[in-house]
Amino acid sequence: MTNEAMESESMSVGSWATNGFLNYMRQLRKQTNSMSWMDFAEESARGWKKMSQKEKNSYRDMDNACEDNAMYVDGEDPQRSNEMCNHPMGKQRRSRNSCAPPEKSCAKPMRSCPKPRKSCAKPRKKSACSKPRRSACAKPRKPACPKRQNRCGARPKCSKPGPVTNNGYLNFVRSFRKKHCGLKPQELISEAAKAWIKLPEEKKDRYRRMACKVTHNERHKRRRVCKRC
């Protein structure tokens, strides 16, 4: 019981050389290099309990004060070494009289404030000829008004008649078009010609006199119809 109490005290305060269990772990680690730290710790504890007192004393008498106190050999995976170093059982305090130089901590101190990263996106340059953007607010559209339907019997709208000409027949077609604006151009000419033929001479002279007022031809002005104006 006294030796076990000394071992438990040396695990927290003493060196590796004065603790038989830690010396046993160092020797066992060389044989089980590929084992993870957690599995290795369980295996070493299980094997230490099965040992006799004589075997335990042989590990306690080992003189390793000036050897490297690390729990791993050369060529071991650094990730498992860091895991062992950071584990509570792997941490130790060296005595003042130890031959080896003071051990450095494996974990690097973390920076309190990370450096601000620079933004990779470069600011776009505004071109001199860029077009002004339209406003985001769209103008309200006027509601579509339904088309007005023609009433029954309503006359279709006629286009404006042309000016009075120096030809009596064309003046008659002009007035005929006002009364029959629903006809197509070919039908209008055909119907106007038929109506002109049926028209008496007295009514034809009316349209001829209209031509006399706008004509600039002296020959037309000397006609019989034009003299009556």
Image: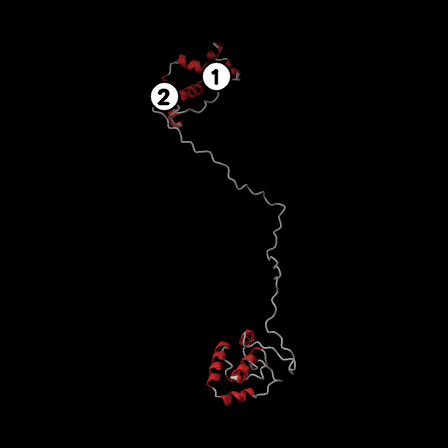
Quarter of the rendering containing residue 194: top left
Residue 211's mark? 1
Residue marked by disc 2? 194
* Location of residue 97 with respect to 142 vertically, above or below: below
* Mark closer to the chain start, 2 or 1: 2
Q: Residue at x 51, y 77 (%)?
A: 37
Q: CA distance from mark 2 to mark 1?
A: 21 Å
Q: Secondary structure at mark 2?
A: helix
Question: Taking the image as drawn, is residue 24 in sight?
Answer: no
Residue extending farthest to the left is 152
Q: Position of residue 21 (x, y in %)?
A: 53, 83
Q: Nearer the viewer, residue 14 or 189?
A: 14
Q: Which mark is residue 107?
A: none
Between 188 and 79, the one nearer to me in the picture:
79
Residue closer to the observer: 15 or 229: 15
Q: Amino acid at mark 1?
A: Ala
Residue beneath the point at 54% across and 80% down: 8
Q: Would residue 154 be found to the left or right of residue 226 on screen? A: left
Where does the image place residue 153, in percent across and percent down from the top left?
A: 34, 23
- Coloring scheme used: secondary structure
Residue 41 seen in the figure: yes
- Amino acid at pointer 2: Lys
Classify residue 198 by image quadrant.
top left
- Please name the residue shown 43% across and 13% down the image: 206
